[in-house]
Image (cartoon, rainbow, N blue to C red):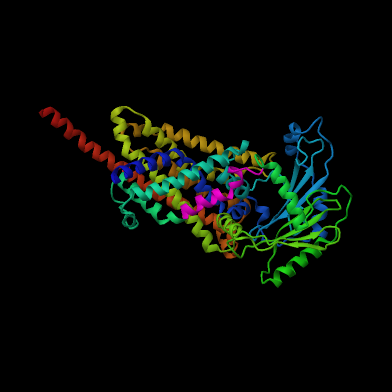
């Protein structure tokens, strides 16, 4: 019975892992990049290559900018189906938000506007702006932040935003990953011995399985906790109870909560003025310091703008701890009078905040950040070697049977492993080559990424014919060489187009850009090592086949 249970777990581990392993590869790889998304932003947008700045003066700088922000044309177009009658020509602001982190040199500003004649009274249209907080200058709207606006959302949503489809797919993949982790532990009885077992000199199937076991065991706690915490972060999407079955109760709870906290739930519909927000920020900092939690402002929110019920919420950055904490302090907008200080969270809320902070990693601990990257890349290695083991175990059998299953899995694996690197580095190269004045520049960069990924997939299909004959596909080595060349090209193009070569960035201690360049060079070196190793294995397999063929023919002749 125990043996049958282990075999069942092996089947579950194999097919669950294969089915959604391609999604998990995207999640792990871009999750690893997202650990340093702000640094990638600075590499991609040279205008932002300056030190992180604290929240600037609201009264002197931010207020005029907020008053100038208008809803984006895209937001208005998307809202046309949500209104009764024609779209309004003017919109009144109802919420302003300024957001930054200890790693952000720029400041992100967001504005919500009422939507006249909306079918849902709570509906809004949106505007945004990214500014240099030193002088208040706006950055061009079409400059794509590769790290925080492309790689990071790709990690959790796959950029499939319709009905949150991508988030649901990633959530399903996380559940499958938890099942694969548990079944993997069950099927490997000698799991601790496998922690110290890696035989790179063995044949490809054995080496791939050893590395699969090793990377899976070493980072097992990391993989389990991050799959679980990711589900916690998006629990509101997966279980939208408050906005579906219990929406009336949810609305009542919000109103009762507003009465309890003193924060107005609705607008008074009476014009109001705004007192000095800078004075409110200073008071919030004083209160944080009195609680031995001195820090900078991470987020500033003005709710019910231009209304008598306006209030200002000041949230602490909280980058000195793992737990996601805001420690919000709220003031009456018209007078600056203190309304409320957020109390310490309950035990359950504290656990949720810790898991959320653990996953989103807003803290300043750089060593822990690099451990996150290593954990994510170990997940990539675990999935990639799982693909290779699956193909190596079946390709000869499929070749004899005339079945193309192993070939298609190999092509998809090539596109998902080396193809992701090709697409990512192509996007970085495009970022440095596209003219700054090119209209819709960000869309061009996204197109380059998608086009390069599709080409990598097509190349994988084209070059996997040897897999159908039971041999190693040359697509792996060829794309490794492409990765090496493209990574070095991205570093050189950064030097040529900005003048920020490694000697300068390292010499001045500007590690955000130096770190990206060094990571690209390390990727190139690893790609070269992998390509050479794959070439040796392919040559050895060819020699072995050549030796076996005469022996087989001689034996047949004697018979």
Question: Which is nearer the eye, 542 or 271?
Answer: 271
What segment carries the magenta color? 222-242
The residue most toward the right is: 271
Examine the structure image and report whether residue 173 is included in the region drawn in magenta: no
Q: Nearer the viewer, residue 87 or 399?
A: 87
- Prevailing secondary structure of the magenta residues: helix
Q: Position of residue 545 (x, y in %)?
A: 24, 37
For the C terminus, give its image quadrant: top left
- Residue 231 within the magenta-colored segment of the rendering: yes
Q: Position of residue 405 (x, y in %)?
A: 37, 31
Residue for point 34% across, 31% down? 468
Using the rendered image of the protein, determine whether residue 469 is visible from the camera's viewpoint. yes
Foreground residue among 20 and 59: 20
Please say if 17 is above or below 276.
above
Residue drawn where x is 35% and y is 38% of the image: 391
Which percent across, then down, holds residue 421?
49, 45
Q: Is residue 290 left or right of residue 519?
A: right
x then y, percent, for residue 32: 52, 52
Work out whether residue 231 or residue 484 is closer to the camera in this orientation and state it: 231
């Amino acid at each position: 019975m125990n043996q049958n249970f282990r075999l069942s777990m092996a089947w579950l581990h194999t097919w669950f892992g294969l089915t959604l392993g391609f999604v998990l590869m995207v999640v792990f790889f871009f999750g690893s990049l997202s650990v340093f998304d702000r640094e990638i932003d600075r590499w991609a947008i040279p205008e932002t290559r300056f030190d992180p700045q604290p929240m600037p003066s609201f009264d002197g700088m931010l207020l005029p900018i907020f008053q100038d922000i208008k809803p984006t044309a895209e937001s208005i177009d998307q809202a046309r189906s949500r209104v009764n009658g024609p779209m309004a020509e003017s919109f009144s602001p109802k919420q302003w938000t300024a957001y930054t982190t200890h790693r952000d040199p720029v400041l992100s500003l967001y504005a919500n506007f009422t939507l006249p004649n909306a079918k849902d009274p709570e509906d809004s249209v949106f505007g945004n702006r990214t500014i240099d907080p030193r002088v208040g200058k706006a950055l061009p709207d079409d400059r794509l932040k590769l790290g925080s606006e492309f790689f990071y959302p790709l990690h959790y949503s796959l950029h499939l935003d319709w009905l949150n489809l991508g988030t649901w797919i990633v959530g399903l993949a996380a559940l499958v990953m938890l099942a694969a982790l548990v079944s993997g532990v069950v099927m490997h009885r000698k799991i601790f011995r496998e922690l110290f077992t890696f035989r790179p000199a063995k044949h490809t199937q054995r080496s791939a399985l050893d590395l699969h076991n090793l990377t899976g065991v070493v980072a097992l706690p990391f993989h389990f906790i991050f799959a679980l915490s990711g589900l916690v972060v998006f629990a509101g999407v997966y279980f939208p109870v408050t906005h579906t079955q219990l929406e009336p109760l949810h609305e009542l709870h919000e109103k009762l909560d507003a009465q309890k906290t003193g924060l107005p739930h609705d607008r008074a519909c009476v014009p109001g003025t705004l007192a000095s927000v800078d004075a409110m920020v200073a008071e919030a900092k004083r209160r944080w310091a009195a609680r031995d939690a001195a820090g900078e402002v991470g987020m500033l929110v003005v709710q019910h703008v231009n209304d008598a019920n306006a209030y200002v919420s000041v949230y602490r950055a909280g980058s000195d701890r793992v737990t996601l904490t805001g420690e919000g302090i709220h003031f009456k907008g018209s007078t600056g009078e203190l309304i409320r200080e957020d109390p310490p969270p309950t035990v359950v809320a504290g656990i949720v905040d810790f898991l959320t902070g653990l996953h989103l990693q807003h803290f300043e601990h750089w060593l822990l950040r690099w451990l996150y990257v290593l954990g994510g890349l170990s997940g990539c290695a675990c999935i990639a070697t799982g693909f290779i083991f699956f193909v190596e175990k079946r390709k000869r059998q499929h070749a004899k049977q005339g079945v193309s299953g192993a070939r298609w899995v190999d092509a998809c694996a090539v596109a998902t492993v080396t193809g992701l690197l090709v697409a990512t580095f192509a996007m970085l190269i495009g970022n440095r080559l596209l003219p700054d004045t090119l209209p819709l520049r960000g869309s061009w960069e996204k197109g380059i990424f998608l086009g390069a990924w599709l080409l990598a997939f097509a190349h994988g299909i084209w070059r996997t014919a040897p897999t159908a004959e039971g041999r190693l596909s040359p697509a792996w080595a060829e794309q490794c060489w492409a990765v090496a060349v493209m990574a070095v090209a991205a570093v050189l193009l950064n030097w040529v187009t900005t003048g920020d070569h490694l000697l300068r960035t390292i010499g001045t201690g500007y590690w955000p850009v130096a770190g990206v360049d060094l990571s690209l060079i390390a990727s190139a070196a690893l790609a070269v090592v992998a390509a050479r190793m794959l070439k040796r294995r392919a040559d050895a397999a060819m020699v072995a086949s050549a030796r076996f063929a005469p022996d087989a023919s001689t034996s047949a002749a004697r018979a």
